[in-house]
Image (spheres, coloured by chain):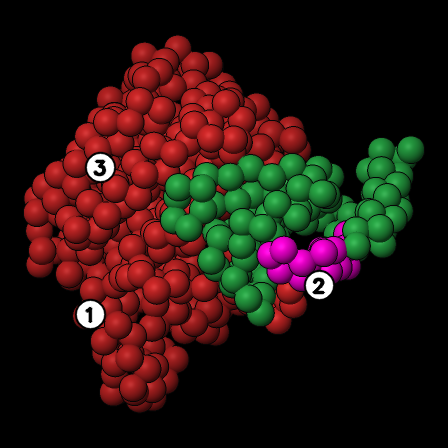
């Protein structure tokens, strides 16, 4: 037998079924693809950066559309960055830049490494003392958050929706408690923006983070945050903004305070188109379809006694499971190579969740989007049940 | 992780042959048959019978020591029913095993 060459992923003969939308959504609505092409068909239009007047102001369009979707009254307080992780780094570092000495910070065991790693770095540097609030069931109880507060607690950073368990957290109740104690509240909405209504107008949240390439149906390389009071976060990156160029100090107005360098025009054109698609489709329709398809898959998986589902009632279209007797990456491999179904396996960048639910071994995650069809759900359920039905063989550990 | 594209589909017989060098596990009724070979501390090979591709995962700390052996395993296999002289492979396996143990465990 001869190895002809090494190659990347093979497409296989079956139609591709993509159930990894909590990582990056795919496919994108046709309008998103068209917007990218359109944005590159003319020179970039950027106020203060060209004498040209042709082209669309995609940045303003994306800012206004997204503000409307998230229920934010002040579009200029919506800042664009590279992604959610970038946003969280800016917010956490910017908040701590305004704090003298060490302070106490809270986060949760549901959180992603985009939150955990920046906070652990500051904990290691003795800039903060970090406490992790455990979850019960699939949620952070507001009472648990209140019990974790100390006199020197200044900041809490937490996820809005778990990327493993698909549970949406009660950020209103938690935010009210935190604000009663004067604690700044940053919420990571990477998994919720585009999937459920957010309503920033009256939410007790100081900063809300989003990413463009998941539920908002844009492309990788776009994200950002909404900031209620810009003065609470010090800018930590400086440079060209296309405005106030005579000043050697970075402008402090919004959104220039946090937006540096040339924007990702094609990415923001895609984001605007993705958001416009969501608004035209309607959040209720999106939620109804996601709920129906998620419930169908869970019902199907529950038919197999050797499948463990870690949250049987997720609020988001996310299903985390393991098949007893099989390693999660073997199940992912079989789905991908045997059935051309793309899921995600392993720890999903959320090690503390897995430590609690599966001993840190990881699991298989299915995540749906508006573009997932009922037929794809049926085929996926059948494939998983077939694998589970054969799992009493010699593969993996029991 | 590397994906290897082979000149002919892998067979049940190929994974039987791999049993000479480690542990093979299977789900024969999924697709054409899912197989997984594991050589602890060195590498694993996963694939479906009938496919011309397999996935090879190397233990990265010793990949420089074991990668050639993977190619040797593939190139020595002659197909179903063909006689294979394992003596060269076994000697090579032993020598590599010793170097891997030394690298990983210092003994």
Res B48 seen here? yes
Q: Disc 3 is attached to a residue of which chain?
A: A
- Give the left or right position of residue A235, taking residue A165 as reference: right
Residue A342: x %, y % from top left = 37, 51
Residue shown at 71%/63% (left/top)?
B75
Position in image of residue A274 (x %, y %): 22, 61
Q: Which colour represents chain A? A: red
Q: Quadrant of residue A304?
A: top left
* Residue numbers of the magenta segment: B65-84
**Dot 2 crowding, Cα within 10 Å, few <14, some 14–19, many 20+:** few
Residue that carries the numbered disc 3 in the rendered image:
A297
Chain bearing tag 1 is A
Q: Can you tell which chain is drawn green? A: B
Q: Which mark is residue A30?
A: 1
Instruction: Identify the residue position indicated by label 2 in the image.
Output: B75
Nearest-to-viewer mark from 2 and 1: 2
Residue B107 percent coordinates (x, y): 91, 33
Label 1 neighbour load within 10 Å: few <14, some 14-19, many 20+: few
């Amino acid at each position: 037998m001869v190895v002809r060459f090494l190659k990347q992923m093979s497409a296989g003969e079956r139609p591709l079924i993509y159930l990894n939308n909590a990582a990056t959504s795919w496919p994108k609505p046709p309008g998103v693809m068209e917007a990218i092409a359109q944005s590159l068909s003319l020179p970039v239009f950027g106020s203060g950066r060209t004498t040209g007047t042709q082209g669309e102001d995609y940045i303003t369009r994306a800012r206004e559309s997204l503000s409307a979707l998230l229920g934010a009254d002040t579009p200029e307080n919506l800042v664009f960055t590279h992604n959610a992780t970038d946003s969280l780094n800016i917010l956490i570092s910017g908040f701590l830049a305004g704090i003298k000495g060490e302070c106490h910070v809270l986060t949760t065991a549901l959180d992603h490494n985009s939150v955990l790693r920046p906070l652990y770095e500051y904990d290691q540097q003795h800039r903060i003392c970090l406490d992790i609030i455990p979850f019960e069931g699939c949620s952070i109880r507001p009472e648990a958050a209140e019990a974790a507060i100390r006199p020197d607690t200044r900041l809490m950073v937490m996820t809005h929706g778990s990327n493993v368990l698909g549970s949406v957290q009660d950020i209103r109740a938690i935010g009210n408690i935190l604000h009663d104690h004067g604690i700044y509240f940053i919420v990571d909405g990477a998994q919720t923006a585009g999937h459920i209504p957010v309503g920033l107008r009256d939410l007790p949240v100081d900063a809300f983070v989003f990413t463009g390439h998941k539920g908002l149906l844009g492309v990788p390389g776009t994200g950002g945050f909404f900031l209620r009071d810009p003065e609470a976060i010090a800018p930590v990156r400086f440079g060209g903004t296309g405005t106030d160029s005579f000043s050697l100090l970075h402008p402090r107005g919004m959104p220039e305070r946090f937006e540096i360098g040339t924007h990702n025009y094609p990415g923001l054109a895609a984001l605007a188109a993705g958001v416009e698609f969501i608004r035209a489709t309607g959040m209720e329709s999106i939620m109804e379809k996601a709920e129906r398809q998620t419930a169908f898959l869970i019902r199907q998986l529950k038919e197999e006694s050797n499948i463990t589902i870690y949250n049987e009632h997720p609020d988001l279209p996310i299903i985390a499971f393991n098949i007893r007797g099989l390693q999660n990456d073997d199940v992912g491999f079989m789905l991908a190579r045997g059935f051309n179904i793309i899921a995600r396996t392993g720890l999903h960048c959320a090690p503390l969740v897995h430590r609690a639910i599966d001993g840190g071994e990881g699991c298989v995650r299915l995540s749906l989007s508006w573009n997932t069809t009922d037929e794809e759900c049926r085929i996926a359920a059948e494939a998983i049940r077939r694998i589970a039905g054969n799992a009493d063989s010699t593969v993996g550990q029991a | 992780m590397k994906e290897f594209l082979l000149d002919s589909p892998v067979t049940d017989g190929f994974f039987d042959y791999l049993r000479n060098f480690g542990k093979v596990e299977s789900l024969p009724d999924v697709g054409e048959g899912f197989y997984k070979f594991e050589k602890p501390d060195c590498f694993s090979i996963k694939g479906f019978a009938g496919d011309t591709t397999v996935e090879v995962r190397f233990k990265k700390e010793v990949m420089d020591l074991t990668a050639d052996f993977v190619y040797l395993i593939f190139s020595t296999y002659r197909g179903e029913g063909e006689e294979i002289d394992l003596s060269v492979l076994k000697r090579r396996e032993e020598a590599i095993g010793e170097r891997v143990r030394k690298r990983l465990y210092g003994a």
